[in-house]
Image (cartoon, helix red, strand yellow):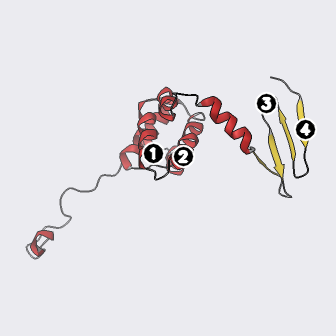
Amino acid sequence: MDDTVQNYVTSHSVEEGYAGRIDVVTGPSGRRRWPEHVKAEIVLESYRDGVSVADVARKVGPNTEALVEVIMRERKHPVQGFRACLGILRLSKGYAATEFEAAAEYALTIGAQSYGSLQSILKNKRYRRAPDRPAEEPAITHPNIRGADYFH
């Protein structure tokens, strides 16, 4: 890895970074962000012609692929689904494949279809527990309880 720091000064910002990564420091808070043109280049490199987000998710595992496909299908706008899927794929790099797959399976089971939900599942290790199942029978059976069929 090249340890050379590159600095670029423009009229509105200071850009600095190591070996290909450029961070933008803006405003008095000094928050670092990726510039939009760098984000676009990363996305274009990662997803060339004929490669979909599901293809990349398949490398993580089948549950991750299924989760990504559900997210892409359920979102109103493709960009929203794409961004959520990119976040999920980025999140997968911080966990073991088996752990992430278990979390993706749990998310599919409970219907969690967002980056935040999956992050919470992983953080709290919810995937280790079976999802709560609603009771199939009524909680109380008594002759005075009529039920939904009575009113039809």
Q: Secondary structure at mark 3?
A: loop
Query: Can the viewer see residue 24 in this picture?
Result: yes
Q: Which residue is mark 1?
A: 71
Alpha-carbon distance for marks 4 and 1? Answer: 39 Å
Residue at the location (56% across, 34% down)? 95
Q: Mark 2 Cα within 10 Å, few/some/many (few <14, many 20+)?
A: many
Q: Nearer the viewer, residue 147 or 129?
A: 147
Query: Are dots 1 and 2 in contact, CB under 8 Å?
Result: yes
Q: Which residue is mark 3?
A: 20
Q: Position of residue 102 (x, y in %)?
A: 44, 36
Image quadrant in which the C terminus is located: bottom left
Quadrant of the rendered structure where residue 88 is? top right
Alpha-carbon distance for marks 1 and 2? Answer: 8 Å
Query: Are dots 2 and 3 in contact, CB under 8 Å?
Result: no
Residue at the location (44% across, 34% down)? 65
Query: Can the viewer see residue 129 in this picture?
Result: no
Q: 88 left or right of 138?
A: right
Alpha-carbon distance for marks 2 and 3? Answer: 25 Å
The three-letter code of the residue at mark 4 reads Asn
Q: Nearer the viewer, residue 44 or 27?
A: 44
Relative vertical location of residue 73 with respect to residue 149 in this rendering, above or below: above
Residue at the location (89% across, 34% down)? 6
Dot 3 or dot 4: first in sequence order is 4
Q: Position of residue 69 (x, y in %)?
A: 43, 39
Q: Secondary structure at mark 4?
A: strand
Alpha-carbon distance for marks 3 and 4? Answer: 12 Å
